[in-house]
Structures are given as structure tokens and as C-alpha cells.
Amino acid sequence: MKKTYKILIILILTTSTLSAQSGSYPGSFARLGFGARGLSMGNAMVSNIFTDVSGNYNPALACFQEQGIVDVGYTFMSLDRKLNFLGFAKKFMIPGQKSSGAGITLGWINSGVGNIDGRDNDSRELGILSTFENQFDLATSFLLSDQVAIGIGFKLYYAKLYDKVTTNSIAFDLGTIYKATDELAFGLSIRDISAKYKWETSVIYGSLGTTTINKFPTLWDFGASYKLPKNSGSVSLQFEYQVNPIIEDKINGLSSKRDNTVIVKIGGEYFLNEHLLIRAGIDRINLKSKDFMGNLKPGLGIKFGKSFTKDIILALEYSFQFEPYTKSPIQNIGVNFKFK
């Protein structure tokens, strides 16, 4: 779908007024979820250690990924948007330790919008424009005991808004897991600490350019996961507390802050047989929202896996997630393989 935007409108995004900025916050692409498993299970992943994990949700999770796993995902979205994933997680034994260990997570989320018909103030064509955002993630975790793991993640955000207008930012994640029993685990993570975008428009306007700083919300996630009897699957419940930053309009001397929000997420997965797994979940359950049904993001998913050798398992995944305020769903197709 081709959309027409004048350059003036695009540049306004870098110097937007207070009222325009208060509607949303930067980095939303990284809060949509990671891979087919997360999208289909309502992103209730902060404590789920019972099947394949993703350190994108909690840097402490990789300690429980006994087999190495590589995830690749491609997402189909409306309005020429794209959302792609690449991830790796694995537990490693520490020399001299029999039960403890460490984990490592590598991840990449890529998002963007293409086919933007660029025009100047006189409607002259300037060519097809595009924007992109990237999150590169490196996380390490350590088992302090058979029950407790801690982790820290380092993120690099790199984004382009228009032509030479780019930005990058370093952010941090902290997380912990408490395995209460073989069937019950609790997780806590704090994500996007110090994340922000700093936009400079002097490359376009010269001395008339401005500097705009957009801070990310900080996410506090707490959840519990339970392994179903006979290792037939798992269910998760999660609460996300989003601490929204203060939005400042230095030109007009104004500032504003939206109320912090609490989101409930639920998800589950069930093995129909040794090869086939089904998933379901609901994201963005906001009990304070006036438009409760409009904000919900229910999802469904399926996974088919097969062992090709004793040490390698290849799987295909698919997720279908409804998106608020549009008839087009978010669909993700993923491939992952596990190895020893």
C-alpha cells in the first residue's frame, strides 16, 4: 500500500508538539513481542522456563535452555510494515560446577515501513522513502543455585527516520527467575532502562535544526508459569507495569506525562503429540481502559517439530494475532532448530 506524506509532515515527527507526542512512545516495535511463540501466547514469557525460551523477555531465561536454539521469524503486517526476528539462546555449564551454569542470549528485532511516497511542500516527487528500527540484544545469565537465576542484558537500538536523520541508543535489562518447584516458576524483569532516541535535524536544516529526545517507557514484568501434568505443556500469567516517561516540549516550555499502566497477559501451550504443539494467549488486558475490547490482542499458534538426528530438532511455527483498530492480523512464520 503506497501512502503519500509531504516532507514537512515527516520532519514534524522530529519536532512534534506536546499534544502529538502524548499519544504513544518510541520503541513500540520492540514491545510487540518476539517470535511466533511469544506472539501466540500473549507475550506472557517472563517466567516460562518449561519449553524453549527467549532472553528478549527476561535475560535470566537462557540458564534454563538446555539445548541450544536458533529462532528465525518473518511477520506479515498491514500498511507496508515489517517485523522480523533472529534469536539464539543456550545454557552452558561452568567448569568445575555440576549443577550450576550460565546462559547466553543473542537477539535481533528489525522493524520498518516502506513504500512511502516522498514529496516536498509543492507536491513534487522525491522518490520512495522508508524508515527502520533495529534492536540488537546480548544477555548473559547465571544460575546461583538450582532454583535461582539472574541475568543482565545489553541492547543497542539503531533507527532511521528520514534520509540522514538516524539515531542510536544503549539500554539495559535486568531479570531473575525463581524455580519454586519442578512445575512452578516465577520471573521478574526490568526492561529498556535508559533507552531513548535522540533526533538531530541539523543535517537537513543546518543552524535551524533542532534536537529532540524521545525516552522509552521502562517495563517492569512479573509473572508465574506452571508446567502441566505429564509435561504436556505450560500456562503463564504475567503483569506488566509500564513506567511512562515525562514528555517535554522545550520550545513551548511544557511537559506532560501519561499515567503509568498495568497490563495483564496470559498464555498457554499444549502438546497434542510429540510433534505437534498448539498455543493461545491474550495480550494487553488493561482493566482501566475505557475501550477494553479494542485494546485486546488475542493470539493463536501452532508448532510442528521433528528430530532429524539424535542431536538436532527442526521446527516450523506459525502465529496469528489480532491487532487493535485494524481488520488485518499480525501473522508470523518462524523456523527454529535445537542442537546439543
Image (spheres, rainbow, N blue to C red):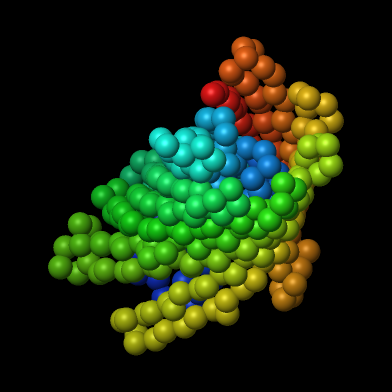
Residue at the spot 66% in from the left edge and 26% down from the top edge: 316
Task: Judge from the rendering whether residue 279 lies leftward or rightward of residue 259; answer left or right.
Answer: right
Residue 60 pos. (x, y %): 52, 51
Q: Quadrant of the N terminus?
A: top right
Residue 301 to residue 166: above or below: above
Residue furthest out toward the top:
309
Residue at the spot 58% in from the left edge and 61% down from the top edge: 188
Which quarter of the picture shows residue 211? Answer: bottom left
- Please state the total of marks drawn on the protein image: 0
Residue 24 to residue 142: above or below: below
Residue at the spot 72% in from the left edge and 41% down from the top edge: 320
Which quarter of the picture shows residue 317? Answer: top right
Which quarter of the picture shows residue 189? Answer: bottom right
Residue 29 to residue 253: above or below: above
Residue furthest out toward the bottom:
253
Residue at the spot 70% in from the left edge and 64% down from the top edge: 264
Work out whether residue 256 can be spotted.
yes
The residue closer to the viewer here, 279 or 97, is 97
Residue 193 pos. (x, y %): 42, 64
Q: Quadrant of the C terminus?
A: top right
Work out whether residue 331 can be spotted.
no
Residue 187 pos. (x, y %): 61, 57
Residue 204 pos. (x, y %): 22, 57
Residue 242 to residue 34: above or below: below
